[in-house]
Image (cartoon, rainbow, N blue to C red):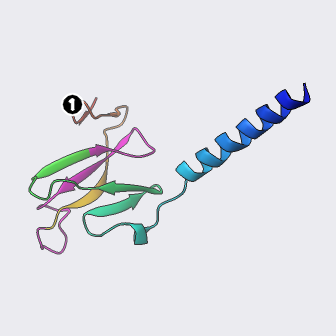
């Protein structure tokens, strides 16, 4: 009985340590800017440097999404480098990655 409790306690501690490591917050220093941004403590990368638009789900909020774009209002300094930007879905909708739209 004691060995079973010890096993359960040890297993629980291992799981908590693993979860703790996976929930570690990412900082801006971990990203190679400008194609990477830290949004809600999670790294979001724009993967395709030649894409006009690239979309990703927001790491923590289904009512938001991340848009990577080369030109347009998000390219504030006009350098044409793709950067990730947080965008909001319309009220009452959530982002659907399968169709890359808020529904």
Q: Secondary structure at mark 1?
A: loop
Outermost residue toward the right in this view: 2
The quadrant holding residue 99 is: top left
Asked if residue 48 is positioned above or below residue 29 in the image, the reply reads above
Nearer-the-camera pick, 96 or 43: 43
Report the number of numbered marks.
1
Q: Is residue 78 magenta?
A: yes
The quadrant holding residue 62 is: top left
Horizontal side, residue 68 vs residue 41: left or right: left
Q: Residue at 72% of width from left, 37% of height from top?
A: 12
Horizontal side, residue 34 vs residue 6: left or right: left
Q: Main secondary structure of the magenta part?
A: loop
Q: Position of residue 43 (x, y in %)?
A: 39, 57
Q: Position of residue 69 (x, y in %)?
A: 16, 56
Q: Residue at 46% of width from left, 55% of height from top?
A: 40
- Identify residue for label 1: 99
Quadrant of the image containing the C terminus? top left
Over which residues does the magenta segment extend?
56-80
Horizontal side, residue 52 vs residue 5: left or right: left
Classify 10 Å Cα crowding around label 1: few (below 14), some (14-19), many (20 and above): few
Nearer-the-camera pick, 5 or 93: 5
Q: Residue at 83% of width from left, 35% of height from top?
A: 6
Outermost residue toward the top in this view: 1
The quadrant holding residue 16 is: top right
Q: Residue at 45% of width from left, 44% of height from top?
A: 60
Asked if residue 11 is positioned above or below residue 72 in the image, the reply reads above
Q: Position of residue 53 (x, y in %)?
A: 14, 50
Quadrant of the image containing the N terminus? top right
Q: Is residue 68 magenta?
A: yes
């Amino acid at each position: 009985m004691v060995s079973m409790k010890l096993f359960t306690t040890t297993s629980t501690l291992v799981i908590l340590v693993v979860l703790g490591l996976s929930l570690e917050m990412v900082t801006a220093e971990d990203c190679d800017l400008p194609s990477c941004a830290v949004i809600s403590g999670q790294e979001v990368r724009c993967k395709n440097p030649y894409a006009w638009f690239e979309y990703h789900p927001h790491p923590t909020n289904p009512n938001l999404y991340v848009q990577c774009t080369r030109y347009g209002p998000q390219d504030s300094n006009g350098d044409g480098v793709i950067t990730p930007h947080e965008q909001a879905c319309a009220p009452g909708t959530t982002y659907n990655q399968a169709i890359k739209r808020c529904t």
